[in-house]
Image (cartoon, rainbow, N blue to C red):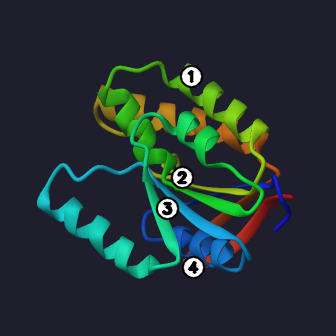
């Protein structure tokens, strides 16, 4: 993976996208930084976060960025480290919950990606492949996540879709 390379990894829930991103990052010769967007709102999520942290192991340093993702990228990017952002979909949910302007925040993210001095892997769920959600909030979330994915994919150097643990190159 080249320096300054931006790679978006998309897939459904439990598709293997995070494992694929972690594998790509660990093949990088530099420092590993996990930029976490998830928050432990309940015991199940706290357990899930702890399990993922243990799976990553001691090579990884974790930075929490549930809302200020662009700022975290600006602060952490360096030629000798790779950032793994997991996941943009939770970040979008956090932004909705905080009544933030998702379009403006996504543009800030794209700007941070563009000025990054080291490689970044970004993980996101593709949520638009299923049925139309039954309520307005779920439809608004699906639409926001889809628009965010399109914007980030357009700015990324490489885009991979993972299904059943198998990565498929969409761009780059």
Q: How far apart, in angstroms, are the residues tagged by discs 4 and 2?
A: 14 Å
Q: Earlier in the sequence, mark 2 or mark 1?
A: 1
- Residue 77 visible? The answer is yes
Secondary structure state at the residue bearing disc 3: loop
Dot label at residue 165: 4
Picture coordinates of residue 131 (x, y %)? Answer: 42, 47
Secondary structure state at the residue bearing disc 1: helix
Reading the image, the residue beneath label 2 is 126
Picture coordinates of residue 53 (x, y %)? Answer: 37, 72
Q: How far apart, in angstroms, are the residues tagged by discs 2 and 1?
A: 18 Å
Q: How far apart, in angstroms, are the residues tagged by discs 2 and 3?
A: 5 Å
Dot label at residue 12: 3
Q: How far apart, in angstroms, are the residues tagged by discs 4 and 3?
A: 10 Å
Crowding near the residue tagged with mark 3, few <14, some 14–19, many ≥20 C-alpha atoms within 10 Å: some
Q: Earlier in the sequence, mark 4 or mark 3?
A: 3
Q: How far apart, in angstroms, are the residues tagged by discs 3 and 1?
A: 22 Å
Q: Earlier in the sequence, mark 1 or mark 4?
A: 1
Secondary structure state at the residue bearing disc 2: loop
Q: How far apart, in angstroms, are the residues tagged by discs 1 and 4?
A: 30 Å
Nearest the eye: 93 or 74: 74
Q: Is residue 59 above or below residue 155?
A: below
The quadrant of the image that shows the N terminus is bottom right
Residue drawn 42% across the image and 35% down it: 67
- Contact? badges 2 and 3 (CB < 8 Å): yes
- Residue 139 visible? The answer is no
Reading the image, the residue beneath label 1 is 103
């Amino acid at each position: 993976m080249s320096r300054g390379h931006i790679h978006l990894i998309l897939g459904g829930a439990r598709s293997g996208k995070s494992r694929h991103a972690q594998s790509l990052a660990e093949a990088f010769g530099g420092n590993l930084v996990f930029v976490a967007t998830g928050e432990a709102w309940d015991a199940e999520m706290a357990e899930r976060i702890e399990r993922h942290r243990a799976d990553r192991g001691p090579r990884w340093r974790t930075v929490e960025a549930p809302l200020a993702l662009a700022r975290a990228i600006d602060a952490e990017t360096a030629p000798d480290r790779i950032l793994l952002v997991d996941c943009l979909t939770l970040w979008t949910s956090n932004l909705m919950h905080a009544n933030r302007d998702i379009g403006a925040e996504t543009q800030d993210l794209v700007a941070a990606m563009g000025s990054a001095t080291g490689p970044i892997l970004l993980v996101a769920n593709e949520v638009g492949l299923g049925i139309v959600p039954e309520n307005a909030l779920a439809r608004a979330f699906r639409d926001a996540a889809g628009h965010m994915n399109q914007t980030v994919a357009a700015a990324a150097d490489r885009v991979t879709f993972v299904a059943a643990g198998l990565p498929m190159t969409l761009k780059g």
